[in-house]
């Protein structure tokens, strides 16, 4: 899937998340689209979603654990 489309889906998901669920939704979306975001830096991720650059750290954390979660049975299609 083109990265542009992934960013739109992520933006839509976090924009419609409950106020107290914003961070959790951002984490879930990175896990869900980790394969599509391969090669995307935290800086580019934040710029594409118009997020403060500090969110790049959260992005990097979720990308790092996505492989382990998938190996443990996580199905991104169910997120």
Image (cartoon, helix red, strand yellow):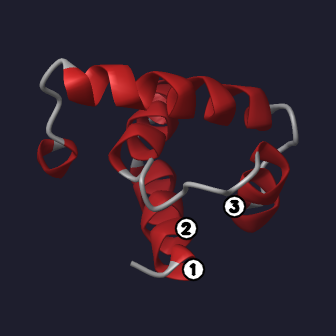
Question: Residue 76's x, y, as percent?
Answer: 22, 44
Image side of residue 22 versus residue 43, left or right: left
Please tell me whether mark 3 sits on a helix, a strand or a loop.
helix
Circles 2 and 1: CB atoms closer than 8 Å:
yes
Question: Residue 48's x, y, as percent?
Answer: 73, 66
The residue to which callout 1 is attached is 4
Please tell me whether mark 1 sits on a helix, a strand or a loop.
helix
Residue at horizontal 45 percent and vertical 64 percent from the top: 12
Residue at horizontal 54 percent and vertical 57 percent from the top: 37
Callout 3 crowding tier (Cα within 10 Å): few <14, some 14–19, many ≥20? few
Residue at horizontal 68 percent and vertical 56 percent from the top: 40
Question: Residue 50's x, y, as percent?
Answer: 78, 60
CA gap between label 1 and label 3 equals 10 Å
Circles 3 and 2: CB atoms closer than 8 Å:
yes
Please tell me whether mark 2 sits on a helix, a strand or a loop.
helix
The residue to which callout 3 is attached is 49
The residue to which callout 2 is attached is 7
Dot placed on the residue nearer the N-terminal end, 1 or 3: 1
């Amino acid at each position: 899937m083109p990265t542009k489309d992934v960013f739109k889906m992520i933006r839509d998901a976090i924009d419609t998340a409950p106020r107290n669920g914003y961070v959790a939704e951002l984490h879930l979306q990175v896990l869900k689209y980790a394969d599509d975001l391969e090669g995307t830096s935290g800086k580019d991720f934040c710029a594409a979603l118009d997020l403060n650059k500090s969110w790049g750290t959260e992005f990097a954390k979720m990308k790092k654990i996505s492989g382990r979660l998938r190996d443990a049975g996580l199905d991104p299609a169910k997120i």
